[in-house]
Structure formats: C-alpha cells, structure tokens
Amino acid sequence: MTTALIIGGGVAGPTSAIALRKAGIKSVVYEAYDRTADGIGANLVLAVNGYRALLELGVDHLSAGFDIPRYRYHLGSGRVLAQVRNGRPLPDGTVARAITRSDLYASLRDEAIDQGIQIEFGKRLVDTEVTADGVIAYFADGTEARGDLLIGADGAHSVVRRVINQGEVPMRFNHMVTTSGYAHGVDVPNEPGTEFMYLGKRSFFCYIPSDDGTIWWYAAPTWPDEPTSDDLAAITPRQWRARLREMFTDDNSAAVEIIDATEEITPPRPIYDLPTVPVWRNERMVIIGDACHAVSPSGGQGVSMSVEDAVELGRCLRDIPDIPTALERYERIRRERVEKVVEFGSSSSRSIAVRGQVRRIARDVFLPIAFNQKAAEKDLENMSWLYDHRIDWDEPVTV
Ligand SMILES: Cc1cc2nc3c(=O)[nH]c(=O)nc-3n(C[C@H](O)[C@H](O)[C@H](O)COP(=O)(O)OP(=O)(O)OC[C@H]3O[C@@H](n4cnc5c(N)ncnc54)[C@H](O)[C@@H]3O)c2cc1C
C-alpha cells in the first residue's frame, strides 16, 4: 500500500489527506507548529468553487463561520456601485462561507483526525531525500519519516518547493499590505450575508458583519515599494492604528469607527503571489496549495485552489498506479487553471490599489459608468470559469 508523507497542516495538507484516504492511500500529515498555535488570525472567505470541491470529498458542510452570499462595492464617498453575488450558489443552496483562518484549519484537521488520519504537530521539515524505492523527510527535531510519496503542502514559503526547484523561486510583491481585525460593540450599516467593500480615497477597506454582531474587517493599503521586515517591525501598533485612522478619515464609511472598536489590529503584512513555479514535482514529490501558486488575498481564491488541488491529486493517485505518471497528470490538470487564478488575484489587487490622487479622482468619475450593477452582473457571468468549476470525484482519470 502506498504511504504519503504530507508536509503542512494548513488547508491543502489535511484536505489532501482526506482525499488520499478516499482514494485508498494512507498518509501522515506533519505540521511545523503545535496544534494550539493558530490563534484567531485573519478572516477569510471560502469561495463556492472551493466549497464545492470540499463537499465532493464527502465531508459535511462547515459548522464554523457563516454564509456570505453577496458583496457590495462602494466608492469612498459612500456611493454604491453594485451589489453582486459571491459566485452562483451550488445546486443544494451552498454559498461562499466567511470563516476565521483558525476555525478553517481546525475544521479540516478535526475532520482528518475523525477519519483516522494521523497528524503530527511540532514537525518542521528541513530537508528531503529521494531513494531508490521511496522518499525520506527530515525534521528539525532530528527525526525522519519514510514514505512512497511526499506532498509539499507547506505554504507560500515552502521548503519542498525549494528542494524540487533546487533553489528559491522569487515571489512577486503586489504593492500592497494587508491588515485586519475584529470590532466589537459597534453599530454600522449591516445586511446579513453581505461584504461591504469600499474603494476608499486612500485605501481599500472591507467589513463583514458576523452572525454574533462582531464586525470582521480587513484593509489593503497600497505600498509602492516592497517593505523589509525591519521597515514593518519599526511601525508600532499605536502608529499603525493612527495611520489607518488617517487613511480612512476622508471616506464616508464606517472604517474609522470600526478601527476604533478593534482591540487588536494585525500588523501590516506584505502581499505576494507566485505567478509561476517552474518545477512542481519530481519522481516522488509534488507541491500543492500556496507552495506552488500563492494567490493574492484580493482574489479570495487561495483556499479554494488548495482544496481543488487536493481533490485532483487524490483522483490522479487513485487511478494511476505509477506515481511519477500520476503526478505528471495532476500537473497537466491543474497548472493552467491555477496560473490563470493567480493572474486574476493580481489584477484584483491592481483594481483596488490607489496609485495617486489624480488617478483616484479619475477612477471615482469613471467607475460608476463602467462598473454599474449591469456591468458587475456581466462580470460575474464572465467569471463562470472560476466559480462554476466542478471537479467530479467519481470521474476516472486516464493517462
Ligand atoms: C491576510 C490573508 C487573507 C487571505 N484571505 C483569503 C480569502 O479570503 N480567501 C481565500 O481563499 N484565501 C485567502 N487567503 C489565502 C489562503 O490563506 C491561502 O491560500 C491558504 O491558506 C493556502 O493553504 P495552504 O495549505 O497551501 O498553506 P497554509 O494555509 O499556509 O498552510 C501551510 C502549513 O504548512 C506549515 N508549514 C510551513 N512550513 C513547514 C515545514 N517546513 N514543515 C512542516 N510544516 C510547515 C505551516 O505552519 C502551515 O500550517 C488569505 C491569505 C492571507 C495572508
């Protein structure tokens, strides 16, 4: 029986373990951090295409989080541009789901553990070795694990990607940072299930009123030059809060009120993506999820791509007994789609960036003409390739 070593217990790792189990393949997941390390973290939205892929594995609907079927775009002046569906609902009514990162990780890991999958925490991969009949994973604590196949689901700064590509693959800075928080006890315009997005005068802001009255939010300030970690570390929480308040003070939105009602704001974090990774695999190893195609958060597709990867990899390994051939088939199925999605994420980043006030004023004049309700609905139809994508688990994969 094939045994897979899965590196990374985020989204792609546990999901691929569930897919492999369904395909009759044993796996063990190795996660660098302790189980309790997730914290509440950023909030995110699982798009319908990713949700559909997850359900295809036979897991239940997520109990954590809440449905978020639509979003509404505003200018900083408060003018509504359009209200659009967050993708077309699935036939059973399932829509996109807002969920915290930690709840999503916990849901996927718990599902894997309930299915009898072994997850080992505190195991940081440092190196790998392909042998004549398998692969060895070496961990920072001096231990090792052996298997027939190794799946690198170790995120944007993947060690497995570096090994497979024999060096670093540079990430692309999106000229933007992201920051987020959870506001309590604030009364803001609210409509359940709606993301309120503001193309502000100086920055993009989005809030989502949750079921329990907490306001989930994030902002994506434009940042022309790539910051170093020292640049960012030099900004104190108090300075960052003041900068954010100042950024949104001229907007007719609830941003400042929401920021004031937030106890802890995540520090600014640069946004990167990975447009293309030259090598995805060798004879015994493959990368999936952010390790091989990190998507800008502006595209709202990183989780979905990771889940879709996991399902497709499971199908390939189920139907093609020769591992290198199965991995080659997997790459053929996935590469074009994920690279297109990374470009979509990058163009979403550009579309919310504020590059100077002259351009911003022009945007505020022309956008209501170009991006009205009708145009936004047409846009959604044009995005059918993304949101309506269906992977059929039962369909056999042929070489
Ligand atoms: C601020 C922000 C907001 C986002 N919002 C959205 C959104 O709204 N919608 C969306 O779809 N996506 C969003 N994303 C993207 C999404 O979070 C990622 O695409 C997704 O988490 C990728 O899953 P993954 O499993 O590939 O990687 P991760 O979720 O990063 O998981 C990788 C795991 O591997 C572990 N690991 C790393 N190195 C090692 C090692 N050497 N050994 C062992 N384990 C290791 C890590 O600890 C981690 O648990 C957002 C991202 C950010 C940063």
Image: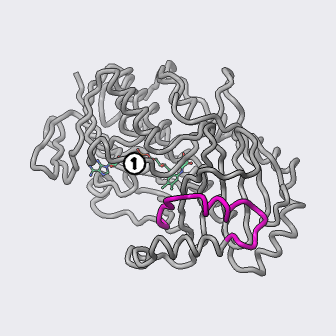
- Asked if residue 284 shows in the view, the reply is no
Q: Amino acid at mark 1?
A: Gly
Percent coordinates x, y for residue 100 in the rendering: 50, 44
Rendered residue at 40%/44% (across/down): 288
Percent coordinates x, y for residue 256 in the rendering: 67, 65
Q: Is residue 268 placed above or below 31 in the rendered structure?
A: below
Quick check: is 190 in the magenta stretch?
A: no
Q: Nearer the viewer, residue 87 or 24?
A: 87
**Image quadrant containing the C terminus:** top left
**Image quadrant containing the N terminus:** top left
Task: Using the rendered view, name the quadrant where residue 321 is placed.
Answer: top left
Which residue ends up furthest to the left in the rendered image?
A: 142
- Residue underneath mark 1: 39
Q: Is residue 57 placed above or below 263 in the rendered structure?
A: above
How many numbered discs?
1
- Residue 153 appears left or right of 340: left
Q: Nearer the viewer, residue 156 or 391?
A: 156
Color theme of the render: one colour
Q: Nearer the viewer, residue 382 or 123?
A: 123
- Asked if residue 373 shows in the view, the reply is yes
Quick check: is 267 in the magenta stretch?
A: yes
- Say few, some or many: other residues with alpha carbon within 10 Å of mark 1 (under 14 / 14 to 19 / 20 or more): few
Rendered residue at 74%/46% (across/down): 190
- Residue 235 appears left or right of 97: left
Rendered residue at 27%/60% (across/down): 166
Percent coordinates x, y for residue 222 in the rendering: 61, 71
Percent coordinates x, y for residue 386 in the rendering: 64, 41
- Segment colored magenta: 248-269
Q: Is residue 116 placed above or below 379 in the rendered structure?
A: above
Which residue ends up furthest to the front in the rendered image?
A: 185
